[in-house]
Amino acid sequence: MASNLVVLVFLVLIIALSAFLKADGKLSPKHYSCECPKASSIVEAEVRAAIQREKRIGASLLRLHFHDCFVNGCDASVLLDDDIAGSFVGEKTAGPNNNSLRGFNVVDDIKAKLEKACPGVVSCADILALAARDSVVYLGGPSWKVGLGRRDSLTANITAANTFIPSPTSNLTALVSSFAVQGLSFKDMVALSGSHTIGRARCTSFSTRIYNESSIDSSFAKALQRKCPLSGINDNEVAPLDIRTSTHFDIQYYKNLLNKKGLLHSDQELYNGTSADSRVKKYAADTTRFFKDFARAMVKMGKIKPLTGSKGEIRINCRKPN
Ligand code: HEM
Ligand SMILES: *[C@@H]1O[C@H](CO)[C@@H](O)[C@H](O)[C@H]1NC(C)=O
Ligand SMILES: *[C@@H]1O[C@H](CO)[C@@H](O)[C@H](O)[C@H]1NC(C)=O
Ligand SMILES: *[C@@H]1O[C@H](CO)[C@@H](O)[C@H](O)[C@H]1NC(C)=O
Ligand SMILES: *[C@@H]1O[C@H](CO)[C@@H](O)[C@H](O)[C@H]1NC(C)=O
Ligand SMILES: *[C@@H]1O[C@H](CO)[C@@H](O)[C@H](O)[C@H]1NC(C)=O
């Protein structure tokens, strides 16, 4: 009898302690290990299948996590659809996102699989963090442990999306400060910009650069001008952010910068006769160093203001609050 009581008290303590640990705002790679042990492998399989269908989608998924985290934290606010009636405006039509963000259907597919396996357990914000990591790994980049336990926002803020996501026309000072606002360092900024070793950009994101700038390789600029004529008819035409290997996560992005072949103005700002040059040179020469700094910076970015404990919710459908 007495021993039963001891066991009972012990169990209650364990449960109270684990609830306390979950509520203390820390992310943990083991967050779903009881309630949804297959969560990570389900995400991984879906990401792999999506990239096998289309290589670029890996880049698009990585970018979704970035655009989520920079706007009031990694809370899946970026996934909320506008309300058809116009009563709710999400972040999808913000300047940096409209006609540009991709991968929402892949997130829906992942969520559907997770809801089948463990209903109401895995957050959309955690899906974005896992899918970003898996995409990088699948395209040949580094891996890292993804802390989990983020919860999903009930709302979104288009003004914040327009304010906090850096612009491709930004100068170095503006880039540094938009990362600093998120608690990310200069080094984090240069490493995370290496994401542009994969994926594509629309003409509108770099047309000023290819017609008007001097720190650009002239044959590179001319080829892009043919792709993006000033008439504007090709507005949704895209070019690879890394001219050489846009489906491989590697150091080619930094090598391009050394040759004045950064696609975006903001890219070339990292190698244009400033203090950033030495860091770009280091990454251009050292894959191990870039991978290590990139992985570390991704972990940091993934920890920006997560909703934990009883804040927010676990959305059933990533596109709308429950
Ligand atoms: C440093 C400041 C940054 C600026 C100014 C910037 C800007 C842009 C722009 C303008 C595009 C092309 C969008 C379009 O034309 O549709 C783009 C694409 C992309 N960005 Fe960034 N970005 C930055 C940092 C980052 C970071 C930190 C990440 C990830 C951690 C990232 C990941 C990507 C990826 C993967 C793509 C290609 C997406 C695709 O092909 O669908 N970017 N970025
Ligand atoms: C988003 O893009 C659509 C389609 O090009 C356009 O009609 C709409 O005005 C844009 N929305 C905003 C808020 O710029
Ligand atoms: C949305 O974000 C803007 C810019 O950060 C901020 O000024 C505003 O208060 C936010 N709106 C809400 C409803 O939180
Ligand atoms: C950088 O851009 C900001 C505006 O975003 C501007 O105020 C500042 O003067 C620019 N700095 C340099 C060094 O050009
Ligand atoms: C290039 O600069 C000129 C003069 O500042 C400007 O009128 C023109 O619109 C710019 N071209 C592009 C493609 O941005
Ligand atoms: C590079 O430096 C030149 C000269 O200071 C400046 O005009 C240009 O805007 C800078 N950035 C890029 C991407 O060319």
Image (cartoon, rainbow, N blue to C red):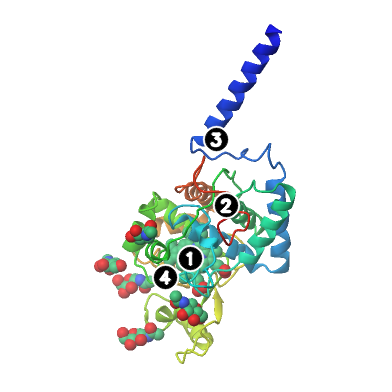
Binning the other alpha carbons within 10 Å of mark 4 as few (below 14), some (14 to 19) or many (20 upward) gives some
Task: Please determine whether, in this image, residue 24 is positioned above or below residue 121.
Answer: above
Badge nearest the viewer, 1 or 4: 1
Point out the residue furthest to the bottom here. Answer: 231
Closer to the camera in the image, 167 or 34: 34
Q: Which residue is mark 4?
A: 168
Q: Would residue 49 be found to the left or right of residue 200 on screen? A: right
Residue 85 picture location, percent across and down: 51, 73
The mark that comes first in sequence, 4 or 2, is 2
Quadrant where the C terminus sits is bottom right
Q: Where's ligand 5: which quadrant? A: bottom left
Q: With respect to residue 301, does 237 lie above or below?
A: below
The location of residue 244, given as percent across then percent down, is 58, 71
Residue designated by label 3: 22
Q: In the rendered image of this protein, does residue 35 appear above or below residue 195?
A: above
The residue wearing badge 2 is 129
Taking the image as shown, residue 44 lies to the left or right of residue 292, namely right
Q: Is residue 220 at all visible to an observer of this figure?
A: no
Q: Which residue is mark 1?
A: 90
Mark 1 crowdedness (10 Å alpha carbons): few <14, some 14-19, many ≥20 = many
Pick whichever of labels 3 and 2 is earlier in the sequence.
3
The mark that comes first in sequence, 4 or 3, is 3
Distance, label 1 to label 3, CA atoms, is: 29 Å
Q: CA distance from mark 1 to mark 4?
A: 22 Å
Badge 3 amino acid: Lys
Amino acid tagged 4: Pro
Find out if the beta carbon at label 4 lies less than 8 Å from the nearest ligand 1 atom.
yes
Please state, as top left, top right, bottom left or bottom right, where the N terminus lies in the image.
Answer: top right
Q: Give the alpha-carbon distance from disc 4 to disc 2, as whole Å.
A: 23 Å
Q: Nearer the viewer, residue 291 or 91?
A: 91
Closer to the N terminus: mark 2 or mark 1? Answer: 1
Is the residue under label 3 in contact with that under label 4 (CB below 8 Å)? Answer: no
